[in-house]
Amino acid sequence: MTHSTRQLAAYGLLGLPLAMAALPVYVHLPKFYADDLGLPLALVGAILLGTRLADAVSDPLLGCLSDRAGRRIPLVAASLPLLALGMLALFHPPADRALLAPWLTAGLLVTYLGFSMASIAYQAWGAQLSTDVHERTRITAAREIFTLVGVLAAAVAPQLLGGENAQGLGRASVLFAALLVVCGAATLYAAPRPRERRTDRSSVLAAIRLPLANPDFRALLVVFVLSGTAAAIPSTLVLFFIHDVLQAPDLTALFLVLYFLAGAAGVPLWVWLARRAGKANAWLAGMLLAIAAFVWAFLLGPGDVVAYGAICVLSGMALGADLALPPSLLADVIDGDERARAGASAEGSYFGLWSLVTKANLAAAAGIALPALAWLGYQPGAPTETGALSLVYCLLPCAFKLGSAAVLWRWQRRVPAAGRLSLQGD
């Protein structure tokens, strides 16, 4: 079944506010609590690590719940109020400094629960909209384009509403809650309904183990882990790099806009390339572009804003491949597994583990990169001691991305010869 542009837009619209939640939590929150509010950097990293790991562990259970419920839409609707409440709490902290750590912990747990419930059911909903491999790419591309629009909105909203401080971030969280209501209502009302599937009645343990028994999923997961780690480290450290290495804090919003706007512009290119060269080959090309663009950031110093802007554009183009192609490949894997299992619903189980891995990557970035920088002597706001920051921010992600590209290249050559599900997109 081919969906109209209006139908794809109605489904993808919810991706906008969901992305607006992700960027402030993963990019602005560490600096906001460590720098502006005065919590120790290592403590912020520990809280982020602990809450993200707790959140990640819950994702497979939420995926099983989604499959057992058999209906994705009510779960999405139930999750949105939790997400709005958590975001409002995180960016409206109490004045008492002694309460900041428990407030941050509780706010993150509520936010993560709402975000996980929404995103797992929402992605599973998209995977059930078509059985055609190319139509799946259109569906995921529509969602990710709105995701990037949401990221752009999240990037510029604090600056427009008062700055990257308590006032600007607090107002941006209110704007987020309003958009979540509007966009959520539009998607719930007007988006295409997912295909009916036989409800999965297997045990929770069996449902969690099901995706891991699929060799195609395991192979795809290894590639995704390495690539996701490569993306998570810069996401956590980008504000520190712009402020202390480039010494251009006033251009933060511009750099983020360039990056995510280039990502949105690149999505149609990767959809086109995936149809002609195969999804795996297109994703591989995106990884190589990301490495070639980003490795040069290690050479930058104070005032190199034009060069960094060019790096943002090129690496942003590569981001489009990371967003549009892996979920489409995952939907292909799920569909092949469900055909073998007589159509029992399993999207939630797969996307629950997929979400777990995504968050484990982000947890590693915050829980390892931030304490490592502290151990190496880096202090936020000390632009004369940025060697460790440049190393961790620039070269370590390139190493992970190169490893991911190598695994993907080897896997996509081996899969057809092994007689498994072809992931080339043909």
Image (cartoon, rainbow, N blue to C red):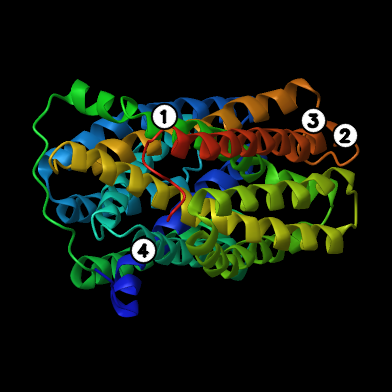
Between marks 2 and 3, how big is the CA–CA gap? 6 Å
Q: Which residue is mark 4?
A: 139
Do residues under tags 2 and 3 come within 8 Å of each other at their CB atoms?
yes
Q: Which residue is mark 2?
A: 385
Residue at screen point 73% across, 44% down: 240
At which x and y percent is residue 178?
A: 35, 67
Do residues under tags 4 and 3 come within 8 Å of each other at their CB atoms?
no
Between marks 4 and 3, how big is the CA–CA gap? 43 Å
At which x and y percent is residue 213?
A: 31, 25
Query: Would you call the spot at circle 1 few (<14 residues within 10 Å), some (14-19), or many (20 or more)?
Result: few
At which x and y percent is residue 370?
A: 66, 30
Tell me which amino acid carries mark 1.
Arg
Query: Would you call the spot at circle 3 few (<14 residues within 10 Å), some (14-19), or many (20 or more)?
Result: some
Q: Which residue is mark 1?
A: 218
14 over 102 or under it: above or below:
below
Q: Describe the element under mark 3 as helix, strand or loop.
A: loop
